[in-house]
Amino acid sequence: MTTTQLHPGRAALLLGLVVAGAVFWHSPVLLPFKLLSVMGHETGHALASLIVGGSVDRVTLSLDESGACLSRIPDGFFARAIVFSAGYVGSAIISVLLLVLTFRFNARRIMLAAACIWLAGMGLIYARDGFTLLFALVMATLFGLGAKWLPDALVGALNIFIASFTSLYAVMDLKDDLWNSAVRSQSDAQLLADLTILPAIVWAALWTLVSVGVLLGGAWLALRDKPVTPASTTALQTAR
């Protein structure tokens, strides 16, 4: 029989970072991390486009925190529904991967290096404008240097900050879609509404619930210590 326990230090750190991100939401210092979250959103669309057999023409980011993934999607309801929905959960999945692989599997440097490769790839393959390319390559370089030279503790802290802020951005993004009709009318929720009989606000509510569920499930897994077998622990203590 194995048992797991919630790690209070990780839980407190994650909660503190989410609260700090919300309090200082409009600080210009956080703009790079907001754009990073937008890139995660657009990456979700890009991957979904490729998975359903389509192609990606370009991905763009803007200083006003808007983004776009222009892709060619095969005809068919399910292919379009998958691609339109993928952006909503893209940021949530990135957050969960960072949390779980950093703390559950101690892959903090690997995750930061993976972020470096991801950003460099998105920039070099899909960026068609100078700003998107510059942002992707600068952030990729910083992450690569961090993975190589930062102490383990700082790498872990950076990963959990990115994860917490990305999850916060995903929820804020969905909040705007849910409560702001002007934003919602130009969102992925509206694309899904045009494709189906469900209104945009229903799609926004649905993907809010799914994204929050993904985030809570990933946080629960990441914030718990690895399973410990009581008998093995007792034997080790006795041997000592």
Image (cartoon, rainbow, N blue to C red):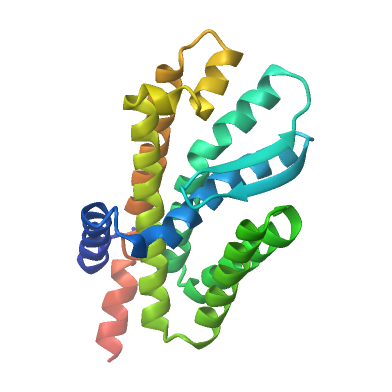
The residue lying toward the viewer, choosing from 81 and 57, is: 57
Residue drawn at (21%, 54%), measured in percent from left and top? 23
Q: Residue furthest top?
A: 197
Residue 227 appears in the rendering:
no
Q: Tell me where residue 98 appears, x and y as whole percent.
A: 46, 61
Q: Please determine whether, in this image, residue 195 is positioned above or below residue 143.
A: above
Q: In which quadrant of the rendered view does residue 202 lie? A: top left
Q: Is residue 147 left or right of residue 155?
A: right
The residue lying toward the viewer, choosing from 54 and 213, is: 54
Residue drawn at (40%, 39%), measured in percent from left and top? 173
Image quarter hosting the C terminus: bottom left
The residue lying toward the viewer, choosing from 112 and 31, is: 31
Q: Tell me where residue 135 appears, x and y as whole percent.
A: 57, 63
Q: Please determine whether, in this image, residue 178 is positioned above or below residue 70.
A: above
Q: In which quadrant of the rendered view does residue 79 lie? A: top right
Residue 183 appears in the rendering:
yes
Q: Please determine whether, in this image, residue 152 is positioned above or below residue 179.
A: below
Residue drawn at (55%, 20%), measured in percent from left and top? 192
Q: Tell me where residue 210 appears, x and y as whole percent.
A: 42, 33
Q: Tell me where residue 11 appears, x and y as whole percent.
A: 24, 60
The residue lying toward the viewer, choosing from 226 and 103, is: 103
Residue drawn at (74%, 41%), measured in percent from left and top? 50
Image quarter hosting the N terminus: bottom left
Q: Is residue 210 left or right of residue 5?
A: right
Q: Is residue 33 left or right of residue 83?
A: left
